[in-house]
Image: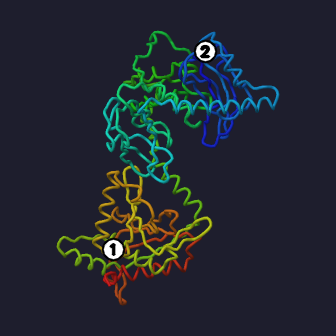
Amino acid sequence: MAEIINMPRLSDTMEEGTVATWLKKVGDKISEGDILAEIETDKATMEFESFYEGTLLHIGVQEGETTKVDELLAIIGDEGEDISSLLNGGAKASDDSKQEAEKSESKEEVKEEKASEAAELPEGVIVVTMPRLSDTMEEGTVATWLKKEGDKVEEGEILAEIETDKATMEFESFQSGTLLHIGLQEGESAKVDELLAIIGPEGTDVSGVAANFKASAPAESKEEAPKKVQEAPKSETPKAAPKQETPKKASTTTSTNGRLFVSPLAKKLAEEKGINLTKIQGTGENGRIVKYDVENYEPAQGAAAVGKFVPAGQEDFEDVPNSQMRKAIAKSLTNSKFSAPHYYLTVEFDMDNAIAFRTQFNSIPDTKISYNDMVVKACALALKQHPQVNSQWFADKMRLNNHVHIGVAVAVPDGLVVPVVKFANEQTLPQIGAAVKELAGKARNKKLTPQEMEGSTFTVSNLGMFGIETFTSIINQPNSAILSVGNIIEKPVVKNGQIVVGNTMKLSLACDHRTIDGATGAQFLQTLKGYIENPVTMLV
């Protein structure tokens, strides 16, 4: 059956594409993974590969021509297949008005077809889509499936663990039935509202439902959807190429500009096996690395010396895909750094009284507070006196918060999360200590909920426990400031005109100049100094 290939969306901002080069011509045989054409987008010229097998029956856009995303690019089908009905429905008319009318009619037909498909869901079948598990989530990655196809699923049972931009969260089923289809394998990602799974009565055939849902997916995911559907079931062994033959153009796997030619499936297999693709000779078209090459790659046992010089070492590297959390961190911090005019105020506090206070406080049975707990409490009390520092910047207004919610930065293996201690000024030191400990534990176990990471009005980042003396941080927007806390240093200090051994701690306040002037930030630090250097005042 003929398949219509539309102009793909090869970048997030792409609206139209230009065919730079066709690498296949009408009548050519096409295999899954073959490069059909090179498409010029708004950002780069990129290879576009086929996700179907068959014969190239029609080319809808010639080299140098441009068309909108999702408009007809080519048709692949069986050799000799009649595609006149497809061409009549999608061909461009020479008359402009006729062309627009046909486009409009085609769009209406697609809408009606999709509506019909949605209405024809088998009885009791529910399509489960990628959920939006946080307010900023745009896509999710399946970390772990806790059910497999064919399993019974009860309402409220955990289906899978989904990695969002903030944390890995459990996703529970809201329906009961049998898990009939899994649309994303572990480690694969999809946009919010794209197909995740299908649940329904046992034995129901949902292959058509899955295919129809993927066919109606947003343009930017269409090029991925067919690949995932076709790759997963494949288990047959690739056709072995005779080892005594030299594959055509197998001497190189890179083009003249050094770009590596490799099929997506081969790249995925190489990542799973930990194989460096630059060490593989491709047997595909133009030296392209394909699945067969990765599966049959054998590392060299040693290299014979050539000439008099043998290199002592070898360049090596590992490409690690960015997690959803890492992408979110990059996006938010880049936005903050280049949109908020940062400036920094650094102070050094005398910590002798704080050390004595903590020692006495922790002598109380079943009580233990940290220096970080004392800093959080002191910040909360100081922020009540300086609402300008406890503010948030928005495009049309500045919000002065009367409540104090302090975010506490916590390092986790994938990056950094900021759980929030709500109403910190109203909590005692032991309560703050217990809250921070619980939230940090959840963060490291990837059990934080989005609600526990939202609503901060100020942030504290403490690297003192790692021996860092002083550092600066990027503001956690829409907050106006973040406090960077260093470690306590024992060193000579001057007291009452005498050099004595003392303990000091350096803190840096990063401020958004749109909301906090220099004098305002300095006044806040003076108030903070009073609480930290005389911690008993925090109990009054």
Classify mark 1: residues with Cα within 10 Å, few (<14), some (14-19) or many (20+): some
Q: In the image shown, does 147 or 504 lie closer to the viewer? A: 147
**Residue type of the residue flagged with mark 2:** Thr
Classify mark 2: residues with Cα within 10 Å, few (<14), some (14-19) or many (20+): many
Q: Is residue 453 above or below residue 215?
A: below
Q: Which residue is mark 2?
A: 55
Name of the residue lying farthest toward the front: 123
What secondary structure is found at the residue carrying circle 2?
Answer: strand
The spot of residue 51 in percent (x, y) is 54, 24
The image quadrant that residue 206 belongs to is top left
The spot of residue 184 in percent (x, y) is 43, 34
Name of the residue lying farthest toward the left: 365
The image quadrant that residue 362 belongs to is bottom left
For the C terminus, the quadrant is bottom left
Q: In the image shown, does 165 or 497 lie closer to the viewer? A: 165
* Residue shown at the point (51%, 63%) measured from the top left: 477
What secondary structure is found at the residue carrying circle 1?
Answer: loop
Q: Which residue is mark 1?
A: 427
The alpha-carbon separation of the residues under discs 2 and 1 comes to: 71 Å
Q: Is residue 194 visible?
A: yes
